[in-house]
Image (spheres, rainbow, N blue to C red):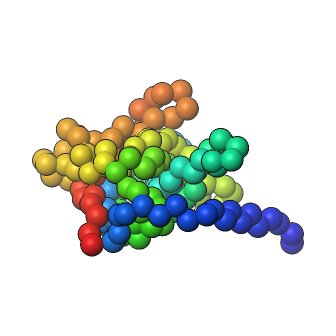
Amino acid sequence: EGGSLFVHITKSQQGSDTGMFTCHIRGLDIKNIESGLLGLGAIDPYFELSKKFVDPDHGISRWHVVYRSEHILNSINPYWNPFEIDVDRLCNGDCPGKELKIAVWDHENWGEDRWLAEVEVSVAELQKSVTKGGNASRDNALRVEDENGEVMGLLVVLKAGVVA
């Protein structure tokens, strides 16, 4: 039925970092935008981790999704599975300052998924944000905000690091 396929090819920009980036994130108090039957619905959140690409020839920047979590049914406090991603794919082997974005979405069975909020961080900031107070601690949590700057929830980083 027609459609489009977009392919983005970039020249390798290898840094010296190698290995796997391992991460575990959970959400807290994600704003419920579902009304559902009798107002009893709840969101089915998932997140996408994207890296920023800046075209060196044109100065145009774009975000490229490098990981998408599973969606968790009916939860404002999702506990997503841990994941790992090759450092080359995540940050072209140059991790500490690489600009990343974590966007939280509401999965829809019918129609398009709905964007809720996002936060921009670096790999180093993710590593500094690892909680020291347990999986419900709000102390180092990342605030995800909508386009108006309203806090739509928190992301607790349970683990973030590069393993050789």
Q: Can residue 27 be spotted in the picture?
A: no
Q: How many numbered marks appear?
A: 0
- Residue 30 relative to residue 33: left or right: left
Most foreground residue, 54 or 100: 54
Q: Quadrant of residue 25?
A: bottom left
- Residue 6 relative to residue 75: left or right: right
Residue furthest to the right: 2
The spot of residue 95 in percent (x, y) is 38, 55
For image coordinates 66% across by 55% down, the residue present is 112
Most foreground residue, 112 or 33: 112
Quadrant where the N terminus sits is bottom right
118 over 149 or under it: above or below: below
Quadrant where the C terminus sits is bottom left
The spot of residue 126 in percent (x, y) is 31, 49
Q: Can residue 111 be spotted in the picture?
A: yes
For image coordinates 37% across by 63% down, the residue present is 16
For image coordinates 44% across by 41% down, the residue present is 119
146 over 6 or under it: above or below: above
Most foreground residue, 163 or 126: 163
The spot of residue 150 in percent (x, y) is 46, 28
